[in-house]
Image (cartoon, grey):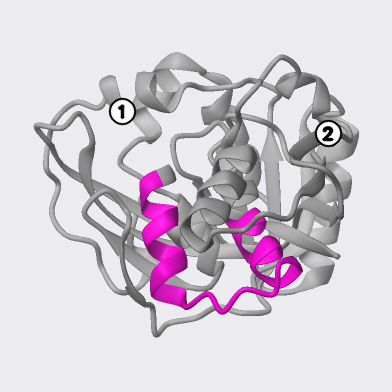
């Protein structure tokens, strides 16, 4: 069996306040690409994980990453004695604002619930996901959602943009989520609008201060024909653009590939 760990996109993100527990109170609109990392599983002794793919090297030496934590938490919750040999095909850059480990953990919960034939309810899986990280619940569901609180208080977002052509671009720089949030200026700029086109990502200035190339990526994407939104996702450094059509997206991808060959990119659509 296998499962996609869909790349996460924050269509808009407002940071409202620092919380006493070290997290921040945010408001965000989550959406997901049609592609991402791939996770597969087969029978085996115990629970183990191998990592392959273009970004596997970035995870070498991680003895207990979120995929394993998710698998062990699910097994403990349902008393599973069977093993699972997991293989993660790491296709998305690490520490890049598009889900990464959270998406992989959500995929692991979905995949193993099927593989172990568990009668696992969505509320039970969400409870496990919340214990793993703030973005894991949204990545578990992998559908258009509004997130409040730490980002884990979720309600459906009624303005779905499913099918919208999407381009993701990353400069090859890993950004620490904690460092970006720590650099936020602390100003509450108000609540999240329903229309993401009227929104913004409040973390962009902090991320740009740490990685100035983000400003260049946003400028490049913003100049492309057919762009509807060009914005940073999450805490960066990945930026995304939504396009009026696939032809415009593909033309932008070709131009960026020619002019900025070192930038990673993924052409997709929103789910």
Does residue 230 sit above or below 164 in this rendering? above
Where's the C terminus, which quadrant?
bottom right
Residue count near mark 1 (Cα–Cα under 10 Å), binned few <14, some 14–19, many ≥20: many
Q: Secondary structure at mark 1?
A: helix
Q: Residue at x 61, y 79 (%)?
A: 162
- Comparing 88 with 55, the one in front is 88
**Which label was assigned to residue 25?**
none
Report the predominant secondary structure element of the magenta stretch: helix
The residue positioned 80% from the left and 46% from the top of the image is 86
**Image-based side of 181 in relation to 50, left or right:** left
Front position in the image: 208 or 258: 208
Q: Residue at point 43% right, 59% down?
A: 137
Pair 2/1: label in front: 2
- N-terminal-most mark, 2 or 1: 2
Q: Tell me which corner region of the image, top left, top right, bottom left or bottom right, holds residue 32.
A: bottom right
Q: Nearer the viewer, residue 206 or 104?
A: 104
**Would you identify the image quadrant in which residue 227 lies?**
bottom right
Region rendered in magenta: 106-131
Q: At which x and y percent is residue 76?
A: 51, 51
Measured along the vertical axis of the image, is residue 202 above or below residue 31? above
Q: Secondary structure at mark 2?
A: strand
Q: Which mark is residue 50?
A: 2
In the picture of the structure, the residue carrying the numbered disc 1 is 181
Q: How many marks?
A: 2
């Amino acid at each position: 069996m296998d499962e996609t760990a869909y790349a996460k996109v924050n269509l808009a993100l407002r940071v409202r306040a620092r919380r006493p527990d070290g997290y921040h109170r945010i408001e965000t609109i989550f959406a997901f690409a049609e592609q991402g990392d791939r996770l597969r599983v087969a029978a085996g002794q115990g629970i183990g994980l191998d990592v392959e793919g273009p970004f596997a090297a970035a995870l070498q030496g991680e003895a207990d990453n979120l995929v394993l934590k998710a698998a062990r938490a699910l097994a403990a919750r349902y008393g599973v004695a069977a093993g699972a040999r997991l293989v993660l095909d790491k296709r998305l850059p690490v520490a890049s604002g598009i889900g990464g480990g959270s998406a992989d953990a959500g995929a692991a919960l979905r995949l193993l619930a099927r593989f172990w034939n568990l009668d696992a309810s969505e509320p039970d899986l969400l409870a496990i996901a919340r214990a793993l990280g703030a973005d894991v619940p949204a990545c578990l569901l992998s559908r258009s959602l509004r997130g409040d609180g730490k980002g884990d208080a979720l309600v459906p977002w009624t303005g779905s943009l499913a099918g919208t052509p999407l381009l993701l671009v990353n400069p090859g720089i890993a950004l620490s989520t904690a460092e970006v949030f720590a650099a936020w200026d602390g100003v509450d700029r108000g609540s999240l609008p329903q229309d993401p086109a009227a929104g913004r990502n409040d973390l962009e200035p902090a991320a740009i201060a740490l990685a100035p190339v983000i400003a260049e990526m946003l400028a490049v994407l913003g100049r492309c024909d057919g762009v509807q939104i060009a914005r940073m996702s999450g805490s960066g450094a990945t930026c995304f653009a939504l396009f009026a059509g696939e032809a415009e997206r593909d033309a932008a991808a070709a131009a960026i590939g020619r002019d900025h060959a070192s930038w990673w990119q993924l052409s997709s659509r929103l789910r």
